[in-house]
Image: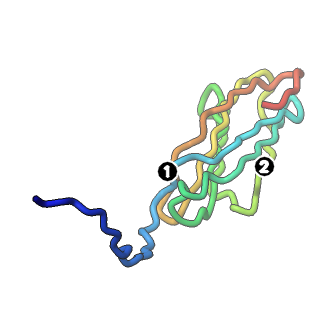
Amino acid sequence: MNSLTNTISRPSNVIVIRTLESMPSSSPMDVQVELTSITSLSIRWNPPLEFEQNGRIVAYKVNCLGANESSSIRLLNISTDAKGLHIKSLIENMQYCISVAARTRLGYGPYSQPICVTMSKNRKKL
């Protein structure tokens, strides 16, 4: 008759490795848009979650997309020291959709969910 016994073995050796850097796997968090006038707005964000950064964040990109290409603004290589920015000279009564992406040395990750605002006298924080 063969009996099974529970035995406790020594744990395996612990190996710590560092994976290669990659593009962020998620977008910046907590994107906030505030109309500061009928032609300007303020945008703030936090970096992606640490385990989704996949390396050191070196820059951000902000898209402020209007109804057509001539009214759209794309801002590249925004410093990681910047926790937000202010965009002026927007067109009154036009709708803009704002999204933010983070970049490592290997490229940009996904954009945040767009926040769409209409540049009107009804100032609000989104």
- Residue 105 percent location from the top left of the image: 51, 66
Question: What residue is disc 1 on?
Answer: 25
| Disc sitting over residue 85 in the figure | 2
Q: The disc labelled 1 sits on which kind of residue?
A: Ser
Q: The disc labelled 2 sits on which kind of residue?
A: Leu
Left or right: 124 as drawn, with respect to 111: right
Label 1 element class: loop
Give the alpha-carbon distance from disc 2 to disc 1, as whole Å. 23 Å
Question: Which comes sooner in the sequence, label 2 or label 1?
Answer: 1
Q: Residue at x 74, y 63 (%)?
A: 81
Crowding near the residue tagged with mark 2, few <14, some 14–19, many ≥20 C-alpha atoms within 10 Å: few
Vertical comparison of 37 with 52: above or below: above
Q: Quadrant of the N terminus?
A: bottom left
Vertical comparison of 28 with 79: above or below: above
Left or right: 88 as drawn, with respect to 95: right
Q: Residue at x 78, y 49 (%)?
A: 85
- Residue 111 percent location from the top left of the image: 56, 42
Asked where in the image residue 15 lies, by quadrant, the reply is bottom left
Label 2 element class: strand
Residue situated in front as seen by the camera: 8 or 23? 8
Crowding near the residue tagged with mark 1, few <14, some 14–19, many ≥20 C-alpha atoms within 10 Å: some
Asked where in the image residue 37 lies, by quadrant, the reply is top right
- Residue 9 percent location from the top left of the image: 33, 73
Q: Residue at x 88, y 21 (%)?
A: 122
List the single residue furthest toward the left: 1
Left or right: 38 as drawn, with respect to 45: right
Residue situated in front as seen by the camera: 32 or 61? 32
Q: Quadrant of the C terminus?
A: top right
Vertical comparison of 111 with 79: above or below: above
**What count of labels does the image hold?**
2
Check if mark 2's residue and mark 1's residue have beta carbons within 8 Å: no
Residue situated in front as seen by the camera: 7 or 101? 7
